[in-house]
Image: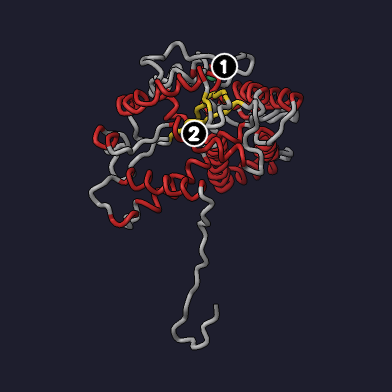
Amino acid sequence: MFHEDYNNSDRILVDEHEIGNGAYRSIKSLLQILIPIWKNSNSLVLQIGDIIKLKLGGDGRKEKYDTLEKVAHIFNDQLSELQENGIYDNDNIHWKIEFFFSADWKFMYIIMGLNALNLKYFCLYCDCELNNRWNMNLQWIINKNTKDQKKPVLFPVIKQENYIPDELHLLLRISDVLMECFFNDLFKKKEFEQQIKNQIEQVMKDIKIHFEFFKSKSNDIQKLWHDFYELYTILRKPFITNSEINNLKIKAKEWINLFCRPNQGQMNSPLQVHGLYKKEDVTPYMHVFSQHIPEFLEKLNEKNLSIRYFSTFSLEKKNHNQVRLFFSGTTMGGGSKEKSVVYDIMEFENRQLYYLLNDTPQKFQMQNINLNNKENKK
Ligand SMILES: [Zn+2]
């Protein structure tokens, strides 16, 4: 829905001039075009009685609240009207509509009117304090962050439970941490091995005491990676059962406990269990993963949805394609240089819609002709 001009963060999609030129599309008229297509498609995208679930999203690492407020202002009336009253298609069939929102963490903060720099109350969904983020004895349910809310939410039409965490960023941000911890360990270990380990072991050997530095940590680290991957695979399943969700609820908390397990038992005793990482290494994403994701899965399950629909992967791809198509120096639409890139994008997408409506084939065969080869084959 939103698009950021990558070259210039101040030129954002909606300004008065562009509204006049039709550089934003009415969701209602888009739906009027798309509903008949969905209804008549062979893959049964939409069946009578279905609720149309629309995901709003965004990707704006540099967006500001004030700018987005202008955008939200344009859409909000239409959104609440659609959610309250639904829509009648051209066969006079009534469809209910429900809105969802998914984006990366920082963008969600802005949309929800929160202050991204609040370190103490960091969560989008609850009042958990930062220094409690590793405490798996606490139970947090999806609610509002009531401690930090500074500004009104930008899309009041979206229910709190319909702000869905983006699973792609969840995966990336958590595996980032695992990776970082892994490399830290590796470097520490190398340094340690080069400098001290052998000396100490030699000294112990000299005084005839069997002594060996622990090797158990690496197995636990392997388990940490393995378990996280397993949990992630479950949460991304297209169909998930309630017992799988319950299992995930327990396993995710166990996973955090393993991640920041403290040292147990006496130093160098055979019974000692070595800790892995520090409690401070637990990130806000890990909090969301362990405390909120299972509840989101439950709620989505009730609506026959899966969290994988909310991955920003598709949006990242769309952005990438748009950047490639429209920012790479080639101006689409016959070189309309005086118009903004957004105008080009809209025009291109309108054309795509037209092709979709009129069954126009969009593929063509690319052929390379080698001029040196006299027998050009088709
Ligand atoms: Zn929370």
Name the one closer to the observer, 264 or 86. 86
Ligand 1 location (quadrant): top right
Name the one closer to the observer, 228 or 72. 72
Q: Is residue 131 left or right of residue 115?
A: right
Residue 45 vertical position relative to residue 154 in the rendered view, above or below: below
| Quadrant that contains the N terminus | top left
Q: Residues within 10 Å of mark 1 (few under 14, many from 20)?
A: some
- What residue is shown at x 59% (from left), y 15% (from top)? 141
- What residue is shown at x 46% (from left), y 11% (from top)? 146
| Quadrant that contains the C terminus | bottom right
Q: Which residue is mark 1?
A: 142
Q: Which of the two labelled residues, at mark 2 and mark 1, occupies the earlier sequence position?
A: 2
**Ligand 1 within 8 Å, label 1 CB:** yes
Q: What x and y, as percent, mark residue 277?
A: 58, 30
Q: What x and y, as percent, mark residue 275?
A: 63, 29
Q: Residues within 10 Å of mark 2 (few under 14, many from 20)?
A: some
Name the one closer to the observer, 193 or 62. 62
Label 1: element kind: loop
- What residue is shown at x 29% (from left), y 34% (from top)? 19
Residue 126 vertical position relative to residue 224 in the rendered view, above or below: above
Q: In the rendering, which numbered label is found on residue 32? A: 2
- Confirm whether residue 174 shows in the render: no
Q: Amino acid at mark 1?
A: Ile
Q: What x and y, as percent, mark residue 308?
A: 61, 36
Q: Is residue 223 left or right of residue 159?
A: right
